[in-house]
Image: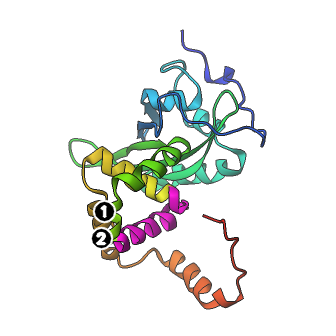
Amino acid sequence: MDRETSEKPEPNVGEDQRERPSPDGPGAVGSFRFWFDDHRWEWSEEIWHLYGYQPGEMTPTTELLLAHNHPDDRAAVADALAAAVRDHGAFGSHHRVIDTDGVHHQVMVVGDGMFDATGTVVGTQGYFIDLTASIATYGREAIDDVLPDLVTSRADIEQAKGILTLAYGLSPDQAFATLRWRSQETNVKLRTLARRLVAAARALHGGPPQQRLQMDHILLSLHEYLDPPDDQT
């Protein structure tokens, strides 16, 4: 019998908890599907393991998902999910997950629309990416694997990293790890994906008005900002 979600252990949110990769291996990536009408979730094994459960141990719910978010990230994730339901858009987020052992994971959610046979948007589907592991793995391997691409296509890659950094609030290393993951997942060269991302972003003709207003303020007041620490990424 499935354990009821009300009996789930409350994750330990102590700040001294170390980060570690998911048990599914370095750079674990899990898939999800979420239906808007009844708020029903489907999680792959990797997502269950990310939270510290066995697949099917309980019913996956929004409440369970939010319970394992870091308290400082929970409201933003809830807002992102509520916006997806309200606007029939994709669910995406970059936040911290705390598993049943109290261990913290840096997670990025990349989503897209889910359609029925008539082409109507009925939900969102995509991937949970455990960046805790992928940074450590891809940060070393990518330098050896794509060095020729970096030499000839550095501008596109750096621009693509900047786009992901702005869109998802990632660090440069996390943005590169995300590009590297998509390159491996799709078997398309990283520099090709970067070039396509830059072109697609330009075709959007800028971000939403509120984002542009925020950027206007930043741009016009940059001379008053303090320099960030040298080790900030």
Most prominent secondary structure in the magenta stretch? helix
Residue for badge 2: 152
Q: Give the range drawn in magenta.
A: 154-173
Please indicate, yes or no, whether residue 60 appears anywhere in the rendered image.
no
Please identify the residue farthest to the left as the structure is shown: 118
From the viewer's perspective, is residue 147 above or below residue 41? below
Q: Helix, strand or loop at disc 1?
A: helix
- Residue 168 forms part of the magenta stretch: yes
Give residue 20's position: percent from left, percent from top.
61, 36
Q: Name the residue under label 1.
A: 148
Q: Which amino acid does label 2 sit on?
A: Thr
Magenta stretch holds residue 97: no
Residue 151 point in image, percent of width and height: 34, 69
Residue located 44% across and 26% down the image? 45
Q: Residue at x 46, y 69 (%)?
A: 162
Q: Do the residues labelled 2 and 1 touch (CB within 8 Å)?
A: yes
Residue 104: % across, % down: 65, 39
